[in-house]
Image: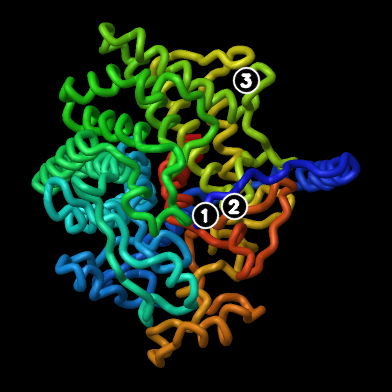
Amino acid sequence: MKKQPRCAALTSPLRFVQQWCLLLSIFIISASARTFDYAGALSKSLLYFEAQRSGRLPYNQRVTWRDNSGLTDGLEQGVDLVGGYYDAGDHVKFGLPMAFTVTMLSWSVIEYGEQIAIAGELEHALEAIKWGTDYFIKAHTSPNVLWAEVGDGDTDHYCWQRPEDMTTSRQAYKIDENNPGSDLAGETAAAMAAASIVFKKTNPHYSHLLLHHAQQLFEFGDKYRGKYDSSVEEVKSYYASVSGYMDELLWGGLWLYMATDNEFYLKYVINKAHSFGGIGWAITEFSWDVKYAGLQIIAAKLHMEGKHKEHNHILERYREKAEHYICSCLKKNNGSNNVDHTPGGLIYIRQWNNMQYVSSAAFLLTVYSDFLRKSDQKLSCHGVVGHEELLTFAKSQVNYILGSNPMNMSYLVGYGPSYPTRVHHRGASIVSYRENKGFIGCTQGYDNWYSRVEPNPNVVVGALVGGPDCLDNFSDERGNYMQTEACTYNTAPLVGVLAKLNHQKVEV
């Protein structure tokens, strides 16, 4: 899943006017009457992670078209790397996006665990987190060694096979003292620290184990500094660390403070705020690569709480940057550095898998809305903005995802009457292994399944696909991977937002 240059936004003025006329007619007719089943969408979003599982599937596996896969991962290197998640429609296990996925799932439970429980989905949320953290424990084989990747993107992309049939390389790659990867170590530390908070009451022993790994990983990443894609060059074409490692070290440090209440970690985030870009970068995206906005929003919460007066000056600077991100999403920065919106109102950052930025923005705005509400504060964009406006905008993004858009299509697979049926996903696009155990080879998959015009035989329920272009257009074709491929980190931020919106709907 490569990062791509920004889509050239709007084309001719005539096309723009035509698009708006179409939009107005659609929205006037349907917007007021549209209601959404947020609880159903939440259930489906958590089901998606079961479709992405690698390893030996458990007895309670609900996605029945999947079976065991990757059972020899790590064998050549003499380490057990069975488990974890496939990040998208292929079968490489990439450590950085997997860790970010688990961080976002954990943050969703930390903020909205009660609402997830009310919807009856807490157990599934915890299972989704633990499937990832169990793998991270295996992958962290010693204090200064973390296995970063299993499989090779280049050879994997030559094949179109079910995960159960894999014949591609399962070479594993690691970071260590001589081959550092501070970004990967920092994000994995963040994931395990956040998960340790999630399991603190229900599974204290496991929580303690996660925290132990998180602290070791953070120390390793900070002591041996370097970008992981310089040590694991195979990842450069897929998940290159464009933002560097400083954001992940700050992010990991802040999550460790949240998990431990140890001033050492807070002072790290304060003392390195300037040199690591925490209070210097005004960011307009939040993603598996760029953590600054999330970091700034958590730091802003600490500022609102007023418990750290000795650090107020730096925390206030963090808050300024957090609010720059929020205002940019709302298009309310004073004439500059705003995020583009499509004619239909969707946040638009890039043409390749744009929905990842939409779901993460919706989550951050929802969380910040709650912070403002609880502290009875407002934020200053180009004008004063209250917590209600933030939540309303976040809700508009979720509603767009679920079908309130010019295509009248849900981009959450399996939700609503119309959704993508040709998702760019190897396992979904080939007959289920449980139905037909006959081996399907690399080229056989391309010849017999990839090019079929029929819908996929298996539905990847809960997958959030890449989504429409800058003019709200979407083409449901398997080969259109910019729009039809889904990723774990697209869906993960939705979990918390859907739980919040469902609870709000129930309360009303």
Amino acid type of the residue that numbered disc 2 sits on in the rendered structure = Trp
The residue lying furthest to the left in this view is 205
Amino acid type of the residue that numbered disc 3 sits on in the rendered structure = Asn
Q: Is residue 213 above or below residue 372?
A: below
Q: Is residue 292 above or below residue 266?
A: below
Residues at marks 3 and 2 touching, judged by CB atoms closer than 8 Å: no
Describe residue 274's horizontal placement relative to residue 57 as left or right.
Answer: right
- Disc number lying in front (2 or 1): 1
Q: Which quarter of the picture shows residue 247?
A: top left
Mark 3 or mark 2, which has the lower sequence index? 3
Q: Secondary structure at mark 1?
A: loop
Q: Which quarter of the picture shows residue 183?
A: top left
Q: Is residue 248 above or below residue 452?
A: above
Which residue is disc 3 drawn over? 333
Label at residue 2: 1
Instruction: Give me the residue at 34% from left, 39% from top.
Output: 107
Q: Measure the alpha-carbon separation of dots 1 and 3.
A: 29 Å
Mark 2 or mark 1, which has the lower sequence index? 1
Residues at marks 2 and 1 touching, judged by CB atoms closer than 8 Å: yes
Q: Secondary structure at mark 2?
A: loop
Instruction: Give me the residue at 38% from left, 66% from top.
Output: 152
Q: Which percent across, then down, holds residue 239?
A: 44, 52
Which residue is disc 2 drawn over? 352
Instruction: Give me the residue at 66% from left, 79% from top.
Output: 453
Q: Is residue 366 above or below residue 180?
A: above
